[in-house]
Image: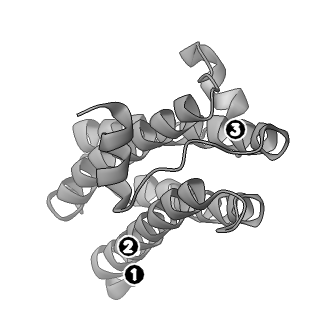
Amino acid sequence: MDKYDALSAAIGSEVTTSIDPVPADPIVIKLQKALCDELLASYQYWTCYQSSRGRGKSDCDPEFKAHAEEEREHAEKLMLRINELHGRPIPHPANWAENAPFGYTPIENTNVREMLTITIQAEENAIAYYKEILKDATAEADPTTHRLIKQILADEEEHLYDLQQLLGDVFLAEE
């Protein structure tokens, strides 16, 4: 299975690899930024999973771990699409935060409530950014990127819902 087959399987339809090069440039740039964001999100969720302590840990750790893997899968799909459009990723991890659409907010302590608050904001930012990408990557202009971004957007909306539910169930219900 080559990378095109892998992406086709991931998004559930045939991959379109030819695209007018003029509109591809801004899309590739946006995909590169989204890739940076997904790599950082995966790392952030993984560190939440590894370092959370105290109240809410047992409820939140399974979500943190699952979200870390799902964000990594998003990064993989974005990388495949960037390659298909003849782009390149941002090559150095030190540059990911400055190229991510909303930067990166490190989680400085092990407080689960703070982790939830920061990751909720990150998911809200990701949702806004993917909606912005969809304005350029229309179904008519770039159907493959459009389908991919719609799938990732749906996952991000689900992540946001999961995190908001956890915050409410674990912390806000008792206030």
Secondary structure found at label 3: helix
* Quadrant assignment, res 17: top right
Q: Amino acid at mark 2?
A: Leu
Q: Residue at x 29, y 52 (%)?
A: 9
- Mark 2 is surrounded, within 10 Å at the Cα level, by few (under 14), some (14 to 19) or many (20 or more) other residues, namely many
Q: Amino acid at mark 3?
A: Val
Instruction: Determine which residue is flagged by label 2.
Output: 167
Q: Nearer the viewer, residue 145 or 35?
A: 145
Q: Residue at x 85, y 40 (%)?
A: 22
Q: Nearer the viewer, residue 63 or 12?
A: 12
The circle on residue 87 is: none
* Quadrant assignment, res 96: top right
Residue 155's spot in the image, x, y percent? 41, 65
Instruction: Determine which residue is flagged by label 1.
Output: 172
Mark whose residue sits in front, 2 or 1: 2
The circle on residue 28 is: 3
Residue 16's spot in the image, x, y percent? 53, 50
